[in-house]
Image: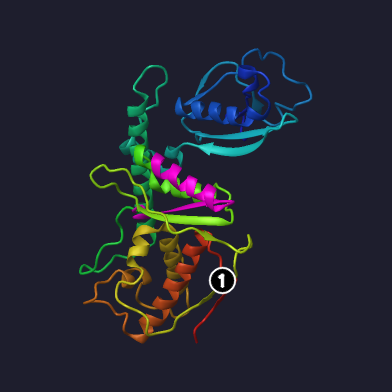
Amino acid sequence: GGSPDHKLYIGSVKPNLGHSEGASGISSVMKAILALENHTIPPNINFSTPNPKIPFSGMNMAVPVDAIPWPEDRARRVSVNSFGIGGANAHCIIETLEEYLGASFTKRHLVPPLQNGNGSVGAHVSSAVDSISAMKMDLRSKMRKSVTAQVASDSSTTDNAYARPSMALYVLSAANPTSLRQSVTDYQEYLGSHKTDPADVSYTLCNRREHLSHRTYGVVTTESVNGAHLVPDFSPLSKTNNNTPPDINMIFTGQGAQWAGMGKELMDEYETFYNTIASLNLVLSELEHPPAWDLIEELSRSAESSNVGRAEFSQPLVCAVQVALVDLLRSWGVVPSAVVGHS
């Protein structure tokens, strides 16, 4: 709790809902978010006599019985703890985006509050999603600028906002061919009649569905053309021999496979790839005799100004790109059993 003027305010969702059993955790999260959105520490109803076994004074804790405006000098942050015999098992720390990014940033990207009832919920949701997307893009741009050296004037810039992947992978599976064919038909019919976010569909199918023995996949662009629904053509059905992932060994190539601009589009499209290149850039800069050049800058150069053909550039550039590729594939669930060098 800190000093007497900085008490640790505690509360509960139980006075509002009673026993919510396994839903108490998510209920507490909802209450915490509403408190943050309204800049108000909510009161606890029907609270009069503190439990004498709890050292409120000694631990500088307080249970508010009236709504308290969020103190200006306190972080807008809430810790949710919900553990109980009814099945709740939750802990999370929630803070406002403003707290994380800074007030000057969020004032430029105000998100209108969502409305319930008979209001135009869809419009508000769409507006909020657009604003949050803008925040994400601006944040990623800031992160890049903090680790990226200034790119030469004749090269393409890399400090643009992070772009979403241009393609999305849809994976379907079933226990037998008949069920899989029906699943393909069902998904194509649904995708053809509903507007969906390909990135969300891809994530759900790849990471939130069981992978059974009979499988197929489809690839779709993430940007609709002329408002058309995005429906992939799925590959021929295939059957895996077992449910154990195969061993994958990756062999790094040596000098000679490099080319100007390699990895540039991957840096633009995939945050994981970019972050690995940025971290390797820091590793190089901390050497006893660091290079006078920058990985990101060199990978972003045009063919006319690229130094990739020079051995002192190509060796670390080729290695860095391949390390970033391993990390990118790993983020997609393609995990190698071993990675070895070419020479």
Q: Residue at x 40, y 84 (%)?
A: 255
The answer to if 146 sits in the magenta stretch is: no
For the residue pair 48 and 235, the one nearer the viewer reads as 235
Number of other residues with Cα within 10 Å of mark 1, as a class: few under 14, some 14 to 19, many 20 or more = few
Residue 250's spot in the image, x, y percent? 52, 75
Asked if residue 79 lies left or right of residue 255, the reply is: right
For the residue pair 33 and 330, the one nearer the viewer reads as 330
Residue 105's spot in the image, x, y percent? 35, 41
Query: Which image quadrant is residue 65 in?
Result: top right
Q: Residue at x 52, y 56 (%)?
A: 215
- Looking at the rendered image, the quarter that the N terminus falls into is top right
Q: Is residue 254 visible?
A: yes
**Considering only vertical position in the picture, is 224 above or below 81?**
below
Label 1 sits on residue: 248
**Considering only vertical position in the picture, is 83 above or below 188?**
above
Asked if residue 220 lies left or right of residue 251, the reply is: left
Circle 1: element type: loop
Residue 243's spot in the image, x, y percent? 63, 60
Q: Amino acid at mark 1?
A: Ile
| Range covered by the magenta-colored residues | 163-190
Asked if residue 337 lies left or right of residue 194, the reply is: right
Residue 52's spot in the image, x, y percent? 78, 21
Q: Residue at x 38, y 38 (%)?
A: 103
